[in-house]
Image (tube, grey):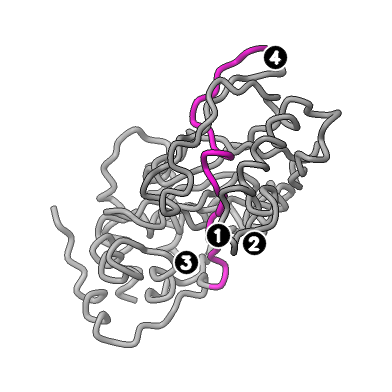
Amino acid sequence: MKFEIAEISEIEQENVASSEYLEAVQRGAFYSPEPLLLTENVVDVSDQLVSVDTKPGSQKKSEGRWFGVETKDLIIERDTLLPVYRSQDLKPFKAKSSAYLIAPTDDDGTHLLDPKHCESRYPRLYSYWLTAERLYLDRRRPSSADSLFENLDFKKYISKQLTLHKSNDRLKVIYNKSGKNLRAASVTPSEIAGQTLYWLLTSSIEEALYLCGILNAPCMQEVWDKRRTSKMHFDKSIFRRTPITVYDHKNPLHIEIVDIANMLSESSNESLVELNEPVQELFRD
């Protein structure tokens, strides 16, 4: 059943206030080129080693610069793989990573390690990286970073997320950059949101559930669609053009959204309609 929310639709014609969350929203890690850095296929070889195939280059992406590039049956150290979330990994309230970046971290998992300085620690990765670096330098755009490692951590998008490792009492909310419907879920702070996602760090489990409840509510999907940045992309526009208030643990309506969201996050039932009434009421106020 389609849920009507006239109060929200009416302010489409107005200069809508931004959400207080807007400044907290970050874009996901921009790792490139994927044929050198991303794998979707990992097979165990031993306790320490895995065999991977890098993602084949696309003729559409990067003007076909990486078309036909891939590495099959690459054996590298297991600890050099970093799970990454992408849009296709995301369902309302649920996320499961299906890809890895070839990106080693330190023992604490808070900083990336440059593979060119890891010869003794990860000799197989080191050998692969030298080959990948040469290919990168040969095919990169003139405006691209000077090294493959710099391009992997473009604008420190990965590093910024890794440094959240110690925020164990908090959760990161991730949502898709584009698509038919908006989908949101929560993950631990240092898990990496990829380039097809946006993310923001919350102060508590309850705040994460509150935001996921609003973003996933069926009654809001038409609103998000109208407030896209472009025909395909949501980007930050949902927070820039919707006055989502900061979570208040004393607000009964916020608590109701959290309770329903918590129930849905633990259920296999994909129906989200129970969110409609409290979310509608939230924006009526």
3D distance between C-alphas at marks 2 and 3 = 38 Å
Dot 4 amino acid type: Asp
> Which amino acid type corresponds to the residue marked 2 in the rendered image?
Lys
State the CA–CA distance, disc 4 to disc 3: 50 Å
Residue 195 as seen in the image, left or right of residue 228: right
Q: On screen, 156 above or below 121? A: below
Q: Does 88 lie within the magenta span? A: no
Q: Which residue is drawn at 43% across and 75% down?
A: 240
The 10 Å Cα crowd at callout 4, few under 14, some 14 to 19, many 20 or more, is: few
Provide residue 8's location: percent of width, then percent of height.
26, 74
- Closer to the observer: label 2 or label 4? 2
In the rendered image, residue 264, in percent from the top left (x then y), is placed at 37, 42
Q: Which of marks 1 and 2 is nearer the N terminus?
A: 2
Q: How far apart are marks 2 and 4 (CA)?
A: 34 Å
Q: Are discs 1 and 4 less than 8 Å apart at CB?
A: no
Q: Farthest residue in the bottom direction?
A: 15
